[in-house]
Image (cartoon, coloured by chain):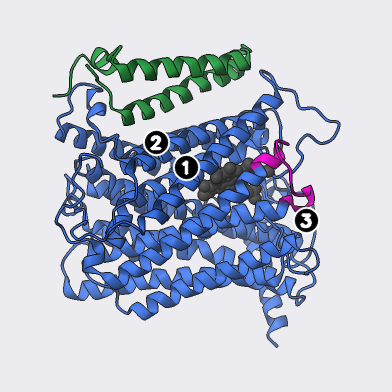
Chain colours: A blue, B green
Amino acid sequence: MMSEALETGTPSFMDRFPQEAAVVRASLISSFIALFLGAVFGLIQALHRTDVFRFLDSQYYYTVLTAHGVLMVVSFTIFFLVGVFTWATVRSLDRPLVDIRYTWAWYGLMAIGTLMAVVAILGGFIPSTDISADVLFTFYAPMQAHPLFYGGLAIFIIGTWLAGADYFRAWYAWKQEHPDERIPLQTFMVLTTMLMWYIATIGVAIAVVVFLLPWSLGLLDSVNPLLTRTLFWFWGHPVVYFWLMPAYLLWYTVLPSISGGRLFSDPLARVVFVLFLLLSTPVGIHHQYVDPGIAEGFKMIAMTNTMFLLLPSLLTAFTVVASMEHGARQRGGTGLFGWLRALPWRNPAFTGMALAGLMFAAGGFSGMVNAGMNINYLVHNTIWVPGHFHLTVGTAVALTFMAATYWLWPQVTNKPIFSRPIALAQVVLWFVGMALMSNAMHVMGLFGVPRRTAEPQYQGFDFVASFGSITELRMQLALGGTLLFLSTILFVSNIALSTGSPRMSGLGKPLSEPLSPAADSPKVLDNLTLWFGIAMVLVVLAYILPLASIITDSGIVDPGVRPVPMLVDAANGLGPISAVTDAASRVVAAVVGVVP
Amino acid sequence: MRDASPGGILLGSAVLFVVLWEIRSALGLLAGVDTNGTVFFVGTIIFVAFVAFGLSVGLFQVSAMIFNERRS
Ligand code: HEM
Ligand SMILES: [Cu+2]
């Protein structure tokens, strides 16, 4: 074992809150099962689309890709999130949840919803059944899935809503006992994130429950693909912050302690989470820059909002690095850069999170390319885009989660990690594998190679590489994907083997207090109602006109969109006010038609 | 005298490999210089292996040279 003593003598989370620890364990295990299965599908498609090894017919590619996408970005990330949030809320409020049966109920709903969706997806491999959901994780109409898929998604989301309510209940109970105290930082982060989630999921809930589910049940003849897409992306951008916020929570509140120091500033951390609550949602249209039927002006607004969103991430980069430096100097590090050596690089939890942060910086840069309306055209729907988000959700989030597990797992199981050297090798392997895979994806994307394609060579068509060759890049992608798969195996088996470690007591790791404490921040930061209200107003401002003009131009459930207008509607003789009233009257008419 | 731990060498080699290998893409995309892929790859591996070996046997003490200080 490494030099740091394993037992600190502090009671662990499991010692103090055994019932909550069981929920955290269940959530994390569900998350890791999804990660493992997702990695299997990831490897299959990485080898398939590069033509290194194909054992499935290309017709199944979308089944594989849907399974990979849904398992990774819905199941793996969100199960981990509820695990971490449950831990963080209970730990920072220092009190148990109000009713553990309620807690198991939302976990159960999430598990059932996931199973339904996964069964529907895997049905795609068995042509003799009529169950399938080859619709990718974006489930754009007119691609249609079996109702089981949409139903599962809906149940899963209801589960997350109830989870959020659980955290609010715990906070409310705590507030009765501590009337004049500031919300503890971790709880503050959990609550603001869940508020953002409540706003964001309005979009996907309407898309799924009002349109896609009834349509796949045969109750609706058609849906308006542009409308359901827009509602999807209303949720689809904020969801990326939903993945990211637990990673930020860990960077802000755990990483400084692991580095041996203290968080630089509690108030700054609160500001960052408030900014994400405000700005995450009114930007979704930046995923629809090439969608016909949405005026350019609205896309321009989404782009501007997106650029503002850079601010909280830059603030985070500053605070996290400053806290790490503080930790290193506490450990005796000196010099302009010499302090870097004093960081605990042998600790896999630290190294994993630091590498994740490093890759996030790279992902941020390619994200800015995606966000620019004009350069987006260059990379849109090319494999550059998966190259980008494997750095963000696929590494900044995924690697942080894995690294944090090495720190958190012993505290919710009272068993040390099976092997810390293997854990260190695992995070380093992920870094190398992802550098290769993501680099190849970015470069191929610039050469025009499409994403979501089983045979991107397009029979008889050659892409032109401006340097090297497409073959070389394909090999690089396949090699990177293979290393990532191996890294996942190392992670999952290390955790699985840890169940055989001897049970110990006193594995708790206390978290240090911020240098600038909560008392330094203005009270208004803790006014969640205010921020929620402003966030709602911003969302309404950003979405009312685009949604109104979509409904006015192409109806609520009418298929087909005219490829115009590409200008702000007012220029087409349609005033914003009349657009909204017209759309509203259509919605009213539709509702009245359904509810006689 | 050894200056680097096995964990540090592993991590350092990984980062060095990634940095060197990304240079090839940067050269190709930004400067329009096409390097030979195989040679670049093998060269990168050899260089990284050399650095890792050198550090592990104490041939050089990079950190001490660059930062001009030693961890007590
Ligand atoms: C085991 C490591 C992984 C490998 C080998 C891998 C491989 C791939 C490949 C090759 C694609 C592109 C397929 C295509 O567009 O044709 C892809 C897509 C994707 N990956 Fe991964 N990936 C891995 C891990 C992850 C992780 C950790 C996440 C997120 C947490 C993730 C999320 C996604 C998503 C959302 C897509 C897009 C699916 C779609 O286009 O519908 N992947 N992956
Ligand atoms: Cu986005």
Locate the N terminus of chain A by quadrant: top left
Part of the protein shown in magenta: A46-61
Q: In the figure, residue A218 lies in which quadrant?
A: bottom right
Return the x and y of residue A418 as percentages of the image width and height.
Answer: 34, 50
> A224 above or below A341?
below
Q: Is residue A209 left or right of residue A95?
A: right
Of A481 and A566, nearer the camera is A481
Mark 1 = which residue?
A395
Q: Is residue A557 left or right of residue A330?
A: right
Alpha carbons under labels 3 and 2: distance apart: 44 Å
Ligand 1 within 8 angstroms of badge 2 C-beta: no
Mark 2 = which residue?
A355
Locate the C terminus of chain A by quadrant: bottom right
> B45 above or below A391?
above
Return the x and y of residue A369 as percentages of the image width and height.
Answer: 56, 34
User: Magenta span has A251?
Assistant: no
